[in-house]
Image: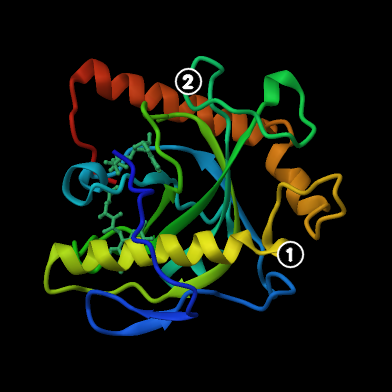
Amino acid sequence: MANQETPSIGPAEASPIASGTTRPLLIGPPSGPVDPYPLRMSGPVISGFGRGSRELGIPTANLPVDSSITPWISDIPSGVYFGWASLLLPPTHPQYKPSSLPSSPENSWSIFPMVMSIGYNPFYKNTVRSAEVHLLKKFSEDFYGCAMRLLIMGYIRDEKDYAGLEALIADINFDCEVAKRSLEREDWRVTQLGDGGKFENEATQWLVRGLEENEKKAVEAAREEQKRKEEEGVGETKL
Ligand SMILES: Cc1cc2nc3c(=O)[nH]c(=O)nc-3n(C[C@H](O)[C@H](O)[C@H](O)COP(=O)(O)O)c2cc1C
Ligand SMILES: Nc1ncnc2c1ncn2[C@@H]1O[C@H](COP(=O)(O)OP(=O)(O)O)[C@@H](O)[C@H]1O
């Protein structure tokens, strides 16, 4: 289902992709994210158009685009971003793997690297702006309705239209490789709490903090909505 098996690319900093263009494999300086990053976003995982898994083989977990919760979202350019996601999976989920960062058992967040698109998906000509996150991890079960927090560390590229699906998939696979390599660098990791890592700070701690009241309410509302749709037998949801 998920598409972590990104193509193996050599050590060069720029590499050709299917479209014939080259672009950098590392984003940002070795010293870590540059202002205004890291940016924070949070919300329940909601459904999209169901195309990620079905058409692309790259599932994307959608978060509500709501400027009352995420004030910067209307000002940020549409495009492809990368960073870290923390996910509040139920302990029964096969990929439940609480982070080693200190958190209480009822707040056992699992942390994953991610790439995401914010925008209108010009290839599909969406009319509503969406925020869609692909986690660089293979999941054997979905996690609709779970709380997710994002620490967006940088910008990869503008969103594009494509002549065909293959070119879109190739670009997303390359984005995954860029995110993986960029986040592996010492001053871009978040899992170093206690090791004197750069993100032994408020931003990292936020990833594993207990849910705020407004986050709980949003998760509850999303679950109710999901339940309602399941009862109505709605297969695909338009955002
Ligand atoms: C890293 C990443 C990059 C993307 N880049 C583009 C893009 O350049 N153009 C585009 O039309 N869609 C882009 N998408 C969005 C996909 O088209 C989208 O995930 C797909 O339509 C599935 O949407 P759904 O989950 O709503 O079904 C990107 C998605 C991701 C995760
Ligand atoms: N690696 C992954 N990254 C993001 N979501 C994943 C991943 N693996 C499984 N999923 C699940 O798949 C769902 C997205 O699938 P997708 O086909 O894109 O449908 P939708 O259009 O409803 O978002 C996510 O909400 C999540 O529950």
Q: Is residue 118 visible?
A: yes
Q: Earlier in the sequence, mark 2 or mark 1?
A: 2
Query: Residue 182: which quarter of the image?
Result: bottom right
**Residue wearing tag 2:** 93
| Residue 195, position as x, y percentages in the image | 85, 49
Label 2 Cα neighbours within 10 Å, binned few <14 / some 14-19 / many ≥20? few
> Where is the N terminus found, in terms of image quarters?
top left
Check whether the beta carbons of the residues at disc 2 and disc 1 lie within 8 A of each other.
no
- Residue at 67%, 26% (x, y): give it: 108
In this rendering, would 172 be left or right of 64? left
Residue assigned mark 1: 187
Is 152 rendered above or below residue 42? below
What colour scheme governs how the chains and residues are painted in the rendered image of this protein? Answer: rainbow
Q: Nearer the viewer, residue 211 or 5?
A: 5
Q: At x 71% / y 37%, what residue is drawn?
A: 208
Amino acid type of disc 2? His
Question: Mark 2 and mark 1: span between their CA atoms?
Answer: 30 Å
